[in-house]
Amino acid sequence: MTEAMIPSTPAPQPRLSPWMLVLLFEVIAALGALQFIYDSYTSWLWFAGMLLLGALCGVVYLPSKGKSLYWTTITALGGMGLMLLVFMVSITGVFSPLLGAWVLLVAAAFILLGRRQGWAYGGLALAAVLVVLTLQQTGVLHFEFRHPPPSIWLTEILILLTAVLLQRAMLLLFNRSEAAVKEAAQQKEKTHRAFETSEARNRAILEALPDIVFRLSPDGMILDVSIGEQANWPTRPEALLRKRVQEFLTSRSTDQTMQAISWSLSGYGMQTFEMEFRHPSQGLRIFESRVVSLNEDSVIMFLRDITVRMQAEKDLRESYERFEIVSKVTSDVMWDWDLQTDRLWWNENYSVVFGHGAAPDHIDQWDDHIHPDERAEVGRSLRFVIAGGSPVWSHNYRFLKSDGSYADVYDRGVVLRDAQGNPARMIGAMMDISEQKRVEQERTERLYRMEILDTVSRELADVGLNNDAVLQAIVKNSVRLIGDLCMVVLLSDQPGHTRLAAVHHPDEKIRDQIEFLLGNRLLSVNTGLSGEVFRSGAAVVLNGISGRESRYRFKKELSPFFDSHEVYASISVPMLVQNRPIGVITLLRLEQDRPYSTEDQTLLQNMADRAGLTLSNARLYAENADQAEQLREANAVLEQRILERTRELAEANEMLTRLATQDGLTGLSNRRHFDEMIALEIRRAKRTSQYLTLILCDIDHFKLYNDNYGHPEGDQCLRQVATTLKAMFRRAGDVVARYGGEEFAMVLPNTGPEQAELLVQRMQNELYNLNLPHAFSKVSDRVTLSIGVVSSQVQDHDAVTPQMLIKASDEALYESKHAGRNRATFRVLQEELS
C-alpha cells in the first residue's frame, strides 16, 4: 500500500507578528510627519526608506511568505537606521554629535540579532560615518553645518529615544516570533514522527490483512491496491493499477459498487454490501464489500471472500431443516444443548413422553430431573465425551416424570465442534425404555423363579419323606420368591380342625409371634381365609385391604398380630391332592404396599402343588407302596398342567407376535411388517447386487363391490384374493402384505424384470380362474387387479430407499388405473433415475 492512500497534514509556516507590522507603520507615519515638517533636499532618501519599509510589508503578506524572518527583521532595522541617518544629517549636519549615538544605536540593534552580525553591521555604520566625514573634508561632498536651535536638538533626542524603544519592541516581537517558529518546528517534527509511526503501523496492518484493499477513484479506477495472502491472487497487485474495478464485477454488483462509492463520497459513511467478484483463478466468488471515503477524490474498498462462509451457512440451514423434520417425525425425545450458554431445546415429544408442561431450558434443570443415584455418573460421562474422550455419548439412567415417578431412558448424543475443535453444541435423542426394562425385568424374575423352583424341586427330592423339612423348604422359598410372611396350615387328624405346620419370615420376632399365637392350637377349618380356601378349593387374593378387613377375613387368633403390624395384601392357595385340599399356603404382604400379581398366584400355586404332591407322596409311600402308581399319575397330571400352562404361554407369545406382524383380516403381513421387510431386502440386495422387485396391486372398483355386495362379502373377497396371492409367492424371502384397504404389496428378492412379468401374468390368470363375480365392475364381470411393478438391480453405491421403490411402483399402479385398469405397468428403477 503506498503513501497516497494515507492523507498527510501540511506543516505550519511561521509568519511575521502583526504587531511588528503595526510598529513599522508607526515608524513610517512618524518619519512621514517629520518630512513635512523639515523638508530638505534629501527628500528622495526619505522616500527610499519609506518604500523600503512598504516593500517589507508587501513581502510579509504576499504569496512569497517563505522568506526568512531573520532577513525580514534585518531589512526593517536597516531601513529605520537609514531614515534616521538621513534625518539627522539633513537637520543638524554631518558634524552632529548624535551621529555617534546613531552608530551605537545601529550596532546595539544588530548585536541583539547576533553578536557576529552586530559587530559587522556596527563596523559598517561607523565606516559609513567616517566616509561621509572624509568626503566632507576632501570637498567631494558639501554638507552645510548648521547650528539648529535647542528645539531641534531636543527633537533629535526624542526621535532617537523613540527609535530605541521601537527597535527594542521590534526585537522583542521578533524573539517571540522566532520562539513560536521553533515551537512550530518542534511540533511539526513530532507530528511528522507520529505520522511516520502511524503510516508504518497502518502499512503493517494492511499487509497483514487477509482481505483485498483497493483505493478507488469516483469512477471506479484502481489507484492503489493491497492483496492479502489468503486471497490467492495469481498476479502481482501492481498489474491492477489504473484498471477499473468494474472489469471484475457482474452487472448487478457494478451498480451496487458505483452507488456505494457515490454515497460514501457524499458523506453517508461506510457502505457494506455483498457482491459477486470474478476471481482470476477461482471464478465467480461472493465477497463482502465495505466502502469508506478517504477524501473527496477517492474511497477505500475492503473485499473479503465469504463464499465458503455462505456455503457453510446454507449447509447449516439445511442441516437445521433436516434436524427439525426428524425431530417432528421421530418418537424419541430429541434435545439440543448449547455448550456455550448451557441452554437446552427439546422437541414436542418431551411433554408427550414425560408429561411435563414445560421442558427444562437450562442444563441445571436437566440435571435436576436425573435420578439422584445416577446424577454423578451421567455428569461424569458427559464431561468425558465433551472433553474429547469419545465421539459419541450414550447412557442408561432414570428420568423424572410429571407424576413423580422415574422413567428408564436410553440417552445418546454427539458433540459438534467449531473450526478450532472446541465443543459448541451437543445434539441427542432420548428413548423411553421403561416397557423394555419391565419386560426384561419380568423375564429375569421369571428365570430367577424357575431357578428357585428347580432348587425347590431338588430340596424336596433331598429331604425325602421328612414332612417338616418339606414344609420348611416351601415356606422359605415362597418368602424368597414372593414375600413377606408365609404360613402353612394343614388338616389335622381331628376332623373339622387345622393346625399351623410351618411359618417363615426373615424377622425371627415375627416368626415367634405367629408360632406363639397359632403354634400349639387346633384351628377351626371353617374360619379365616384358610377356611374359605378349604371350602372352595380355590385361591383367595386380597389386595389393598384395610386393618378392619384384615381382622374380619383372618382367624381371630391373629388379632394381636394385626394390632402390631400393617397388612397390605394377602394370598392363599390350596395344597391339592387329587383335587382335594390337604392344606393352605398363605402369604401376607407386610413391608411394602405392592399388590400380589397373577404371576405371584401362579407361582405360589405351583409351589403349593409341589408341596402337596410331595406331602401326599410321602404319606402314601409310608402307608402303602401300592399307591405309588397313583402318585405317579398325579405327578403326570401336574407336569401336564405345567406343560399346558407353558404351552399356553408360548401360544400367547406367538399370538402377540402374529398380531404385531400380520393383518387380522387376510392373515397376510401388515404394513408395519412390510416396511421392515422391504428395508431389509434392499440392504440384502445391496450386498449381493441382485434384482429386487416390488409389486403393488389394487382391486378394481372395490368400493362398488362393497356398496353392492356388502362389507362381509367384501371382506370375504379380500381373503380369497389374499389366499391366491399367498399361494403364488411362497419362496423363502417373498413377502405378501396387505398394503391398504384393497391394496396388496409383494416384495420379491432376486427377481428381475422378465421374471416379474411372468409372475404378474400368472397372478392375473390365477385371479381370473378364481372367478370371483363382480357384476358392478366397469372393466370386467369378475374381480380384477390393476398392477404396478418396479424392478431394481440394487448396487452397493446406489441410494435406493424403500420410499423410492414404493413411489415408483405407486406411479406404475396409477398409470395402470389411468390406462383403463385390469392391467399391469412395468418399470425399471435405474431407467427412471437416468
Image (spheres, grey):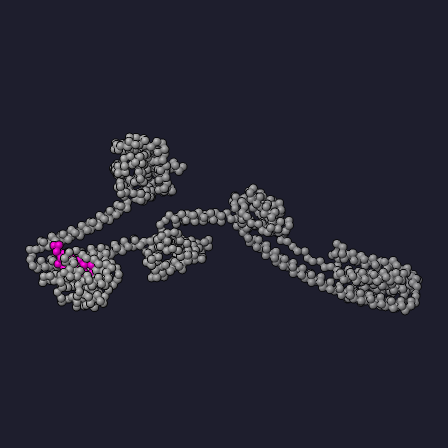
Q: Position of residue 119 (x, y in %)?
A: 80, 66
Q: Position of residue 752 (x, y in %)?
A: 32, 36
Identify the residue at image location x=35%, y=40%. 806
Quarter-wise, where is residue 507 in the image?
Answer: bottom left
Identify the residue at image location x=55%, y=53%. 209
Identify the residue at image location x=15%, y=53%. 638
Residues in magenta?
571-587
Quarter-wise, where is residue 103 in the image?
Answer: bottom right
Identify whether 832 is placed above or below 152. above
Q: Between 497 and 646, which is closer to the camera in this rendering?
A: 497
Q: Position of residue 272 (x, y in %)?
A: 56, 49
Say whether residue 471 is visible: no
**403 horizontally vs 553: left or right:** right
Q: Quadrant of the C terminus?
A: top left
Q: Between 121 and 530, which is closer to the camera in this rendering?
A: 530
Q: Between 776 and 462, which is closer to the camera in this rendering?
A: 776
**592 horizontally vs 638: left or right:** right
Q: Position of residue 71 (x, y in %)?
A: 77, 60
Quarter-wise, where is residue 732 in the image?
Answer: top left
Identify the residue at image location x=9%, y=54%. 630
